[in-house]
Image (cartoon, rainbow, N blue to C red):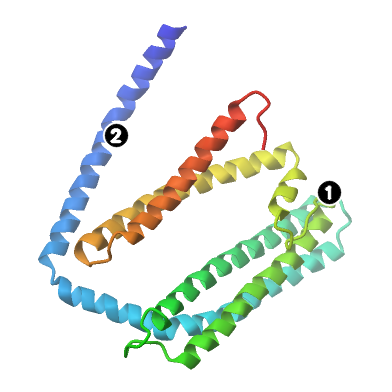
Amino acid sequence: MKNNSDEMAKRENKKALPKFILIVVLSLALGGMLGFALVTLNLQDLQGALDGAGLFFTNHAAPWLLITLPVAELALCLPIYFSAKKQLAGWDGENETVSGQADVKLSVCLWVTGLCTVAALFLLAAMFAGFVGNAGTERMMPAPMFFGGLAAFLADLLVPMVLQQKLIDLTKRLYPEKKGSVYDPKFQKKWYACCDEAERAIIGQCAFQAYQAMCWTCMALWVVFALGGMFFSWGFLPAMAVCIVWGAGQSVYSWWCLKLDRPGGKL
């Protein structure tokens, strides 16, 4: 049995190795060409263009985007929410087509609200860089623009929170066994505890896809920030931040694999 397993492992490694070597060679070639292109370009002009674009974004675009974000979020989510609510108002409790359509609409709205929250946090950080980071210089963001954006950020937090509460409450009409409030810090844990085995299997598959996407995204960002540190004086902090997120994801995944593999291991 052991010999068969060893032979199978050797065959799999032998089959996968040429593809792996090809990927490594192509990656090195692409990196070399990109590095050569950056060396031969006029980096001072490119650095100046990047600085100008960053200054415009932090001082002008970020505050206005913070103001328009909750409006756009409501404009997108409210029609979908009311459409799902109308469907469930006439739902007989058995028609799976109606419940499936409503479930998709509610899931899309939850997706949008989550992305809007992340976008708001990014825009706030950009705005702080324009105001606090450039304090005392001619590059500093005007104070009225900063405080207007700060007030808009509070709306950016409030709108997704209220929307998510409405969406979750409507979802409970579909699944009465679900419990928890979005205002409860342990909401996700309580919601997961109410899921059956099939739902947990779906959550596990989705989590695995998210984990893979995180790894590939971190790898791509590390390349970008490493090159930026070499050619544009970005320093090592952006690459370090990406590696911290990457390492945290790897560590949490490995920790729970070890814990759940033990006899009696559970979440």
Secondary structure beneath label 1: loop
Q: Where residue 200 appears, x then y in whole percent?
A: 68, 41
Quadrant of the rendering where the C terminus is positioned? top right
Q: CA distance from mark 2 to mark 1?
A: 48 Å
Is 33 displayed left or right of 152 in the figure? left
Given the current orientation, which residue lies at the most extreme front position?
A: 136
Callout 1, which amino acid?
A: Glu
Which circle marks residue 177 in the picture? 1
Q: How many marks?
A: 2
Q: Earlier in the sequence, mark 2 or mark 1?
A: 2
Residue at (46% x, 91% y) in the render: 143
Eyeballing the image, is 179 above or below 138?
above
Is 204 displayed left or right of 31 in the figure? right
Secondary structure beneath label 2: helix
Is 153 displayed left or right of 191 in the figure? left
Given the current orientation, which residue lies at the most extreme right position?
A: 92
Residue at (50% x, 80% y) in the render: 65
Callout 2, which amino acid?
A: Lys
Question: What is the quadrant of residue 225 in the picture?
Answer: bottom left
Which residue carries the number 2 mark?
A: 19
Q: Where residue 57 appears, x then y in whole percent?
A: 39, 80
Is 151 displayed left or right of 86 in the figure? left
Q: Give the crowd class for mark 1: few <14, some 14-19, many >=20 residues within 10 Å.
A: few
Nearer mark to the viewer, of 2 and 1: 1
68 or 184: which is nearer to us? 184
Residue at (48% x, 70% y) in the render: 122
